[in-house]
Image: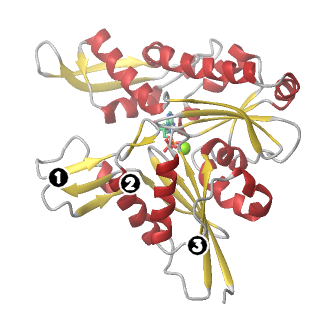
Amino acid sequence: MCLFVKDVGIDLGTVNTLIYIKNKGIVLNEPSVIAVDYDSKDLLATGQEAKEMIGKTPENIIVVRPLQDGVISDFEMTARMLKAYIKRAVPEPSFFTKIRVVVGVPSGVTEVEKRAVEEVVRETGANEVYIMEEPLAAAIGSGLAVDNPMGCMIADIGGGTSDIAIIALGGIVTNTSLRYAGDKQNDAIIAYMRKQYDLLIGEKTAEEIKKKIGCAYIDKDDPESIKQMEVRGRNIISGLPKIISITSIDILNALEDPIKIIIDGIKKTLEEAPPEIAADIVSSGLVLSGGGALIQGLDKLIEISTGLNVSIAENALEAVAEGTGKSLESIERIQKYLWKGSKK
Ligand code: ADP
Ligand code: MG
């Protein structure tokens, strides 16, 4: 007997994991990071607490980002992390409650991994589990009318992957998945600082620079868009600590190549779409979601390079989670587009 249905959406992202519960909204938003004891493998920390340990761990602690480059690189750790999050965010179900879960996974995830993710979620007490490709979830979460015959386009730029898709009638018509997103931008900033200033910086600093002064396009009429900050690192020649001052123009140069790859991916997706649908996109435009969409001026640069109208989803960082959760409201209709493993 089942009196209640609880709908849960999970965004298993390469950088952040989010859990959405119907009527409550986002109830968990944590970095996809786990820390365990090297010898006993006991769980020490997850999420923000574990992320703060990165780069500072003594020998007896291992900190892992179990999803990297858009694939599950360490399945066991992904499962442990996901279980810990579900336990924290979703209250123990009563006998009368049926739990339905949609999990949004990076598009590089294989069939075997989808099955394994399903299994992990089932073990936490879910009765029905669906796996959804991220771009579809991002489009639903961004408020796009994915069911319409009129095509719409989304580019979800996360940490490990950029997923670009054209969607019509509830399904993906054309898509491109690139292993190029926020993480590679951090790498590009590290390489640039080393080459240009002989300065060695870590991943955390690179990410901080990107968020503070990162930009993809500089508006010449708005000199205030050029920001400046001080960066601490180690001089690679002397080996000593060094502080230098950099501006948005440095980061513009550093990010040129990784951003061009995303723009080329958008162009390729448009070229591969059937002509009528491509014509729809000219009027409906492109929506950007994911944390990578927040780089200053990226929307403008894509607009100039493609001629499309570009907008950033209001909830760029939450779009996938909200999309997975909301998709359950019309699960009967969109079921055919979801991956559903074993029936139990
Ligand atoms: P994923 O879906 O892979 O978990 P997210 O959509 O959560 O990724 O986005 C994470 C990425 O977005 C990270 O690379 C992070 O550095 C980047 N990001 C987050 N906020 C900003 C910002 N304000 N400016 C630029 N990049 C950002
Ligand atoms: Mg994502």
Which mark is drawn over residue 344? 3
Q: Where is residue 121 in the image (x, y as percent from the top left)?
A: 49, 65
Q: Position of residue 185 (x, y in %)?
A: 44, 26
**Real-space Cα separation, disc 2 to disc 1, in angstroms:** 17 Å
Foreground pick, 305 / 205 = 305
Which picture quadrant has residue 34? Answer: bottom left
Mark 3 or mark 2: which comes first in sequence? 2
Amino acid identity at mark 2:
Thr
Label 1 belongs to which residue?
A: 61
The residue at 83%/32% (across/down) is 284
**Mark 2 element type:** helix
Q: How crowded is mark 1: few (under 14 residues within 10 Å), some or many (20 or more)?
A: some
Say above or below: 173 vs 314. Answer: above
Foreground pick, 336 / 191 = 336
Q: How crowded is mark 3: few (under 14 residues within 10 Å), some or many (20 or more)?
A: few
Mark 3 or mark 1: which comes first in sequence? 1
The residue at 60%/24% (across/down) is 298
Say above or below: 10 vs 167. Answer: below
Q: Nearer the viewer, mark 3 or mark 1?
A: 3
**Real-space Cα separation, disc 3 to disc 1, in angstroms:** 38 Å
Which mark is drawn over residue 8? none
The residue at 50%/43% (across/down) is 109
Mark 2 or mark 1: which comes first in sequence? 1
Which mark is drawn over residue 78? 2
Say above or below: 219 vs 131. Answer: above
Q: Where is residue 120 in the image (x, y as percent from the top left)?
A: 45, 63
Q: Residues within 10 Å of mark 2 (few under 14, many from 20)?
A: many
**Real-space Cα separation, disc 3 to disc 2, in angstroms:** 23 Å
Determine whether the beta carbon of the residue marked 3 sits less than 8 angstroms from the nearest atom of ligand 2: no
